[in-house]
Image (cartoon, grey):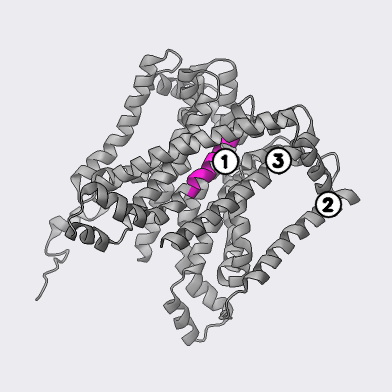
Amino acid sequence: MTVQRQAMRPVRVRTVRWLVVIGALILLELLVRIGVIDDRLVAPPTDIARSAVELAPTQQFLTDLVATATSVAVAFLVGAALGVGLGMLLWRVRVLGKALEPYLVTVYALPTMVFYPMLLAVMGLGRGPLVLVATGMVVVPVALGTMIALQSVNPTLFKVGRSLNCRRIDLFRKVIGPAATPLAIPGLKLGFIYAVIWVIAMEFIVATAGLGYRVGADYRNFDTDNMYAYILVIMVLSAAVNALLTGVERRVRRDMS
Amino acid sequence: MTVDIPVASERPDLAARSAGIWRTIPDDPWLWVARVLMPLVMLGLWELAAHFSHLVPGVVPTVLTLANELSSGDLMGHALSTGQAVLYGFVLAAAFSVPVAIAVGRNRFVYEVGEPLFAAAFALPRVILYPVMLSFLGVGLQSKTLMAFLGAFFPVVLMATAGVRNVDEVLVRFGRTLELNRRRMFLKIILPAAVPSFLSGLRIGFSVSFVAVVVAELFLARDGLGVVIQRSYARLQLDQMFAAVLLVTAAAFLGNVLLRFAERRLHRSRA
């Protein structure tokens, strides 16, 4: 069994990765152009890319983008705030933490989406229930991540703070906060990704505007060109968001720990 | 300093406590109380919502509607249709994940190339690919199975790969001292060590694939629980809709509990 002892040169890894992606796209392009894949089912990637670019300045696209972006922003900001608060509570009151943790983890399996009919009945049609469902899905990873981050803080730090006679608030601001923040970043990152995923998924099923909605509407209207353009936009956006967050995570970890 | 560790034969009362169903009660009784209270709190909140909104049926009427629909209506058929897609997709994902986990887990280069692609794919909302599947595979079992497959794929491959990667190096070196060939090393050392993570992944994967199928059915499908929910919402038959939602919730919860039980069973028989 070979054991790779030399470090993987990052340039080489990145090159291979890009080659894989571009190779797959070229393959798809060829298959559609030749006719192996019916071009009524899917347009060649270059055509999809072109229609996506043409799509960008249109009014419809901007409206959809704004709707999705604001929903994601609200869901994430509210969800993260609640999540951090809940995480801190679960850490301080240990019985609550231990009792609630398995139920919180169940939310991954059984999303807050099941409450959608109830929210709909209570709040009526509109983006409210959609944003609330997404917010619920953000709270869980952020709360769990914050709880774990606080639990992972080196206990020596608490003793140091206490030995220096810190006030409670100073202990939080100067000691625990900076120590726990880099550890809590993965939870926040996952929360943001979930915000994007669930806003778009809920839009796809129940909304009247937004990027997710547009994909569903285009399918129903047999507007496959527009549909694929929007799918491409969503893919690019989610990959970009993921890359950005990973970069932020790395930066925070490097600067703070 | 000697420590007296009680032996089961000498302390039958403690032995009984640590066996069977008593194992589910943790040492802290308050924890047990809190864990039992949580579902009751949820039911209570539901009743509260029903009280305030005449559009939300109460807990008992929903359960009665559900029982009625299951026995006399065609809800069972829909449930089986959903279950079939979930089962097929889930089993395919489990089978597919084994070679992938091995390839990625034991080869550092493949892992470094593939991991960011995997993470980027995870960030994509899978549902938007469903119309593409419908175009290629039509409206029916195949599309739903593919959605279930994609749903289960991520958690199962993630956990399986982690299991293969994190095999205790001591065990691997032990295998090498025995001069095991590649196949034996794999079958006897790596696979058994990776099984617990794999089972964990299966448990999560089942739940995610179940949700994925129901969500796909909410958009468009021939039959299934999502179709029932969508249809009863469109017809404003809210009591039927809530009954179907309750069934989906209960089924996902039950599946999760059963798999967790199986996981723990296997853990105990190996440990």
Judged by its main secondary structure, the magenta piece is helix
Name the chain letter of the residue that bears numbered label 2: A
Asked which quadrant contains residue A82, the reply is top left
Q: Residue furthest top?
A: B54
- Crowding near the residue tagged with mark 2, few <14, some 14–19, many ≥20 C-alpha atoms within 10 Å: some
- The image shows residue A232 at horizontal and vertical percentages of 72, 43
Q: Quadrant of residue B41?
A: top left
Q: Is residue A67 magenta?
A: no
> For the residue marked with disc 1, what is the amino acid?
Ile
The residues colored magenta run A189-200
Earlier residue among tags 3 and 1: 1
What whole-number distance in Å separates the C-alpha atoms at marks 3 and 2? Answer: 16 Å
In the picture, measured across the screen, residue A38 lies left or right of residue A12, that is right
Q: Are marks 1 and 2 in contact (CB under 8 Å)?
A: no
Q: Looking at this view, is A102 or A179 the one in front?
A: A179
Residue at disc 3, secondary structure: helix
Give the residue type that dot 3 points to: Ile
Q: Does the CB distance between marks 3 and 1 fall below 8 Å?
A: no
Residue position for label 3: A231
Image quarter (top left, top right, bottom left or bottom right) of the N terminus of chain A: bottom right
Work out whether B51 lies above or below B198: above
N-term-proximal mark, 1 vs 2: 2
Tag 2 residue: A29
Q: Amino acid at mark 2?
A: Glu
